Image (cartoon, coloured by chain):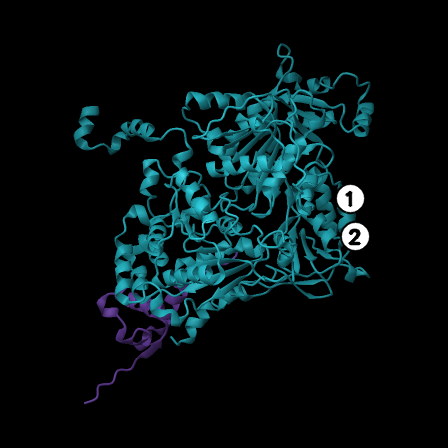
Amino acid sequence: MVNAIKGLFISCDVPMAQFIVNLNASMPPSERFIVHMLDPTNMFVQPHVAHMIRSKIGEFRDQNSYEKPQ
Amino acid sequence: MAGGDGDRHRAPKRHKSSTPSKAALVDESAEFDYADDFDDDAHDADTEVKKRDFTKLELKVDHASRPLWACADGRIFLETFSPLYKQAYDFLIAIAEPVCRPESMHEYNLTPHSLYAAVSVGLETSTIISVLSKLSKTKLPREIIDFIHGSTANYGKVKLVLKKNRYFVESPFPEVLSTLLRDEVISRARISPEDSLGAPSFTVSKTSGQIASGHEDLLNGMEIAAATEDKETHSFEIDPSQVENVKQRCLPNALNYPMLEEYDFRNDTVNPDLDMELKPQARPRPYQEKSLSKMFGNGRARSGIIVLPCGAGKSLVGVSAACRIKKSCLCLATNAVSVDQWAFQFKLWSTIKDENISRFTSDNKEKFTGMAGVVVTTYNMVAFGGKRSEDSEKIIEEIRNREWGLLLMDEVHVVPAHMFRKVISITKSHCKLGLTATLVREDERITDLNFLIGPKLYEANWLDLVKGGFIANVQCAEVWCPMTKEFFAEYLKKENSKKKQVLYVMNPNKFRACEFLIRFHEQQRGDKIIVFADNLFALTTYAMKLRKPMIFGATSHAERTRILYQFKNSPEVNTIFLSKVGDNSIDIPEANVIIQISSHAGSRRQEAQRLGRILRAKGKHQDRMAGGKEEYNAFFYSLVSTDTQEMYYSTKRQQFLIDQGYSFKVITSLPPAEEGPNLSYYTLDEQLELLSMALNAGDDMIGVERLEEDSDGKALIRARRSAGSMSAFSGAGGMVYMEYSTGKGKGVQKKHKDPSKRHHLFKKRYA
């Protein structure tokens, strides 16, 4: 019997994957979204989290980039 | 989350080129396009192009041959490819503040302070306006003309003069003096000459009574004053301790009568002359001449600041100034090593006799003899507030009582304002000259220097000096080192928030990049390399692993000297590791490669100072000229761990250099993959061992090293994440130049604890 789950396939570089893993780990157990870690750069996650991950990553990289004050 | 997002994340960084910061010329119709340089695609709001309408500006017929654009808001844009560039540059640097100076287009800003500086070097309002309108492609906007008039009308009317160890405020216009005296601060600072008659209600009338004898009437007096350059002036004396406040009150944002400080050293017969001349082989370069001519414009010496890049020969400017004034000179440096260097420079460039020059540091208290002489010491020694040894007390007393012809202050940007105040209140000098390479501070305290020392007299353009072959042509590069999986996982953990810095500095990829660069430059090019690390743990770990000598705060003066000597002379020692003690003033002319593995948060001036360590020109002069054999002869690498806070700091730090016209090249593939096991930390096991070492490092090790002279306010606020080094606590780090260890003092202070914090058992006892 084949068991199929609908989900989202994420492919990114190693540090970003770690960021998502860390994000996943910081959630309460019921909201964790990583279905399967395929390898250090690819993973399979719940379909509804795309937006949340995008905004978290956006936030994180804003913290790390400097803009010259005008 | 597609792979493309990773790229998008990095895309904005690639904009770090040397395009002018804000402006790009759109077309000849005098319209400017204020494209925001940092159009980060994440913020769509920021990509909106701010447009200003300049269509009203009237373009002159022969605009093509004129070099600059002047906008109504005081901004000026200069085309560096214009044949008139050189003349226009000399003029603009005198009247305006440089904002950004890349290769083809410079941006300047007219400010009240910059105009103050212009008038103090002798430019007149009418000259400023006429030259500016001659150079401008468009008709000068009304606003600019009004602004220049408004800002310069009162300049130069009041002078501050030191006579026989007393300070006087002088002016040819008695009505100006009475205006000043109406100010509370100034009238309080005034010392009445006739003490018995001193009643406050007579202030104004007394001002006119102070007109020097020999004036028949006011009008006549003014004419004479104008004709003979203030030979007869009106003056009142002020309290030496209040000088700084009075000067501040007179600045444009208060009373708007900024004071000129000039010293007529040729006619000073009170202070003994010092027999010193520049040696014939000391030939100042054109820009050094120019900066000196700004200082000695009308045969007198003006106080102010000269800004030259590191390695461009600031010391020669200082020594030349002292040689022209030929009076006693007090030279202040930041640390003992640079005191030695200054003393050496004086002996190298001038004919001063050995007995006339003395050094005054905590290990080296040379008494000075004779009527006049040069004393080289540190800011700390002069400003030190605690108890001194008998020897140094005597010397300080001597410094205090003497009337100095020139107060020469090195690296003025590092010294905190309160220390300056102290130094300036202790020492009485006719003329103050501040030298620096980087007139930026993160805490925006730089404007304080305007009244503490004086206006900026000259600022050199870095790229012009590079083209002239006077400073090295540096290739700046930012090396992106991706974090390894394990390190980044630890970096993201909340409980490691205090260890973030040590984690991104100890990133094995960074270590490997560093090792590769050292090996490449040592073996392939035979270069001399300095590696900078602010983080003590990283410094020691890197240096031990790579077996290189290192210098940090706790390294003794003798050992520093020995390591530096080895580095300069031995073919075996080609790389040294420095903590931030090496940022300023340690003169290492041999080095031409810098690798920066960790830094002091977002401090722009640290970046510039570090670059300065390799700016001193090397090799043959003709090779260095534009089109010479070597395109680049110095290299500045900044190793950055991607996806960490370091990226933020790194971009911020580069701003000053980018404003000077430098561009940073981004290198992403270091070390090359084929290096593999040739470099350290290749295997996962080794990396994990390093990780556990980093995580277990004591709190005292992972923080930023703190030195005594550290006070670059704001940059620290975000960076300071843990306690400083153990040695700093014990009084060893950075305290070596102090007279006494603070151990005793602390013990006493600790006894007076806040009673509310006392343990309840003891509360009763003291109640």
Marks 2 and 1: same chain? yes
Residue B289: where, in percent of width, then height?
A: 69, 43
Task: Name the subunit of mark 2.
Answer: B
Residue B115: where, in percent of width, then height?
A: 68, 43
Label 2 residue SS: helix
Chain B colour is cyan
- For the residue pair B473 and B688, the one nearer the viewer reads as B473
Residue B698: where, in percent of width, then height?
A: 27, 48
Quarter of the image where the C terminus of chain B is located: top left
Residue type at tag 2: Lys
Task: Name the subunit of mark 1.
Answer: B
> What residue does disc 2 label?
B134
Does residue B512 sit above or below B538 in this rendering?
A: below
Q: In the figure, residue B85 lies in which quadrant?
A: bottom right
Q: Residue at x 43, y 64 (%)?
A: B480
- Is residue B486 in view? yes
- Is residue A70 in view? no
Chain A colour is purple
Q: Residues within 10 Å of mark 1 (few under 14, many from 20)?
A: few
> What residue does disc 1 label?
B127
Does residue B472 sit above or below B384 in this rendering?
A: below
**Left or right: B395 with respect to B537?**
right
